[in-house]
Image: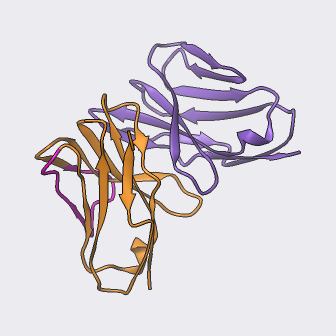
Amino acid sequence: NAGVTQTPKFRILKIGQSMTLQCTQDMNHNYMYWYRQDPGMGLKLIYYSVGAGITDKGEVPNGYNVSRSTTEDFPLRLELAAPSQTSVYFCASSHTGFEQYFGPGTRLTVT
Amino acid sequence: GQQVMQIPQYQHVQEGEDFTTYCNSSTTLSNIQWYKQRPGGHPVFLIQLVKSGEVKKQKRLTFQFGEAKKNSSLHITATQTTDVGTYFCADTNAGKSTFGDGTTLTVKP
């Protein structure tokens, strides 16, 4: 099993550009999450999903959108990128909603 | 999720010394998870505690859940350089987790 995979690993965006961060898991987990981690800080939940077709906002959803059309995929969309969205983005999945498996992360810079 | 506070933010120890990080909440926690993130890496699940007063051990790591379920601790005995990283606690409710800001451990050989 590959576990949780994220693409791209790195990306530089100009202010106002848009992009989609991809996340795929092959563990048939119902729960999936998107977090951002700013330097020296903890993880802030952006969006999460408890199953295909269901998504909910986390602590910091503004400026982001998600969809969950399949169990495996949970893409995160950034519209009109802003410097405040410079961060490391982690996707995670879980079978129970408790023990989470994280992907390797996407390092995003907005200039 | 509820807000969880972690202390200290940083801890620097000599190899062989012990290390403890604490996770505190003003309200009762349903459960607590602990994760470790190596520098430049992603968080890795270590353990979950659910019961009041629960104690679990993983080799040199000891995890405790307070009797009132408002705090938890992670203790590492005789630290090694492989223990460096940031340790996070998290509280999970209805599938949604709230992470503490973590304690970053550095170990001097």
Image position of B59 with respect to A14: above or below: above
Which of the two residues, B81 or B10, is positioned nearer the viewer here? B81
Classify residue A93 as left or right of residue A102. Answer: left
Chain whose colour in the figure is orange: A
The residue sitting at 59% across, 16% down in the picture is B56
Which of the two residues, A90 or A63, is positioned nearer the viewer here? A90
Using the rendered view, name the quadrant where residue A49 is placed.
top left
Classify residue B82 as left or right of residue A10. Answer: right
Question: How many tags in the picture?
Answer: 0
User: In the rendered view, how is the structure colored?
Assistant: by chain
Q: Indicate the quadrant containing the N terminus of chain A: top left, top right, bottom left or bottom right.
A: top left
Magenta span has A68? Answer: yes
Q: Indicate the quadrant containing the C terminus of chain A: top left, top right, bottom left or bottom right.
A: bottom left
Image position of A55 with respect to B44: above or below: below
Magenta span has A49? Answer: no
Residue B14: where, in percent of width, then height? 88, 41
Chain whose colour in the figure is purple: B
Residue A93: where, in percent of width, then height? 33, 41
Using the rendered view, name the quadrant where residue A17 is placed.
bottom left
The residue sitting at 74% across, 40% down in the picture is B82
Q: Look at the magenta stretch and give its main secondary structure.
A: loop
Residue A108: where, in percent of width, then height? 44, 71
The residue sitting at 16% across, 51% down in the picture is A68
What's drawn in magenta, residue-wise? A56-70
Residue B36: where, in percent of width, then height? 58, 40
Using the rendered view, name the quadrant where residue B19 is placed.
top right
Image position of B82 with respect to B71: above or below: below
Image position of B42 with respect to A60: above or below: above
